[in-house]
Image (spheres, grey):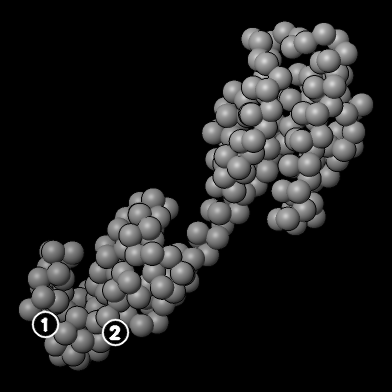
Amino acid sequence: MFIEMEQLRSRLNKFDLLENYLDNGEKGEFVAFFRELFTVEVPLFSEEEGRWCELELFSRLSAFFLSYINRRRLLEELDSSTIQAEKMLSPDEHAGWNEMIDYFCELGAVLADYNGQQQIERTHEMIAKVHDYIHQFLHEELSLTKLAELVYLSPPYFSRLYKQMTGQGLLSYINKTRINKAKLLLKTTDRKIHEIASEIGLESAPYFTRLFRKRTGFTPQEYRDSSKSW
């Protein structure tokens, strides 16, 4: 596959797209696009011209990855043997064009994979924060907007993210938590049905009864009565 010098230079201007893939933890997309941009199967130019082209490409790739790692303070987070800094800083560490491309491609894959794992961990932390809030303020109105504000996300995005990570909708989790709390109160207290409804954040006792029956197969009173015989 032959590509002209100017075409190669135009591809060097697409680092912003590569950076987006890295930031989003999209390892597969990064590798595919990087290979599309820079993999060659045969020498591009004469030996001398090819060497200068290789040096130009190396300097641009080296600067891109070095800047990326420094700006995001990743050097201390990643295994130095994985980064192999000498290969990032010296073109003489590579036997040729393809070996150089392989190194930078693998480096990008490592960075994207790390970012992806960090995003997952941050998402789990956000979900845990929201769950804690739900349990603490179950008696209050728990709107999607209010919960999304806790983790500084838009309501639609947080709703999609929550379902993607947990396999259930946010409202489903809230209702399950409310019913579990109601079960406990029905078994351990003599509070009236409408008082329990209010305590779990449902002002309407009839709605609480419908929701409880839907979730358990019993009305709240039937559940209370049956629990006394356990």
Which residue bears the numbered disc 1?
Answer: 205
User: Which of the two residues, 118 or 102, is positioned nearer the viewer here?
Assistant: 102
Asked which secondary structure carries label 1, the reply is helix
**Number of residues whose C-alpha sits closer than 10 Å to that of mark 1, classed few (under 14), some (14–19) or many (20 or more):** some
Q: Residue at x 40, y 82 (%)?
A: 136
Q: Name which residue type carries label 2.
A: His
**Number of residues whose C-alpha sits closer than 10 Å to that of mark 2, classed few (under 14), some (14–19) or many (20 or more):** some
| The C terminus sits in image quarter | bottom left
User: Which of the two residues, 172 or 31, is positioned nearer the viewer here?
Assistant: 31
User: Which of the two residues, 230 or 41, is positioned nearer the viewer here?
Assistant: 41
Q: Residue at x 85, y 22 (%)?
A: 52
Q: Residue furthest front?
A: 6
Q: Residue at x 82, y 8 (%)?
A: 46
The answer to whether residue 99 is left or right of residue 155 is right
Asked which secondary structure carries label 2, the reply is loop
Question: From this viewpoint, is residue 108 visible?
Answer: yes
User: Which of the two residues, 173 or 77, is positioned nearer the viewer here?
Assistant: 77
Q: Position of residue 62 (x, y in %)?
A: 79, 38
Q: Name which residue type carries label 1.
A: Ala
Which residue bears the numbered disc 2?
Answer: 139
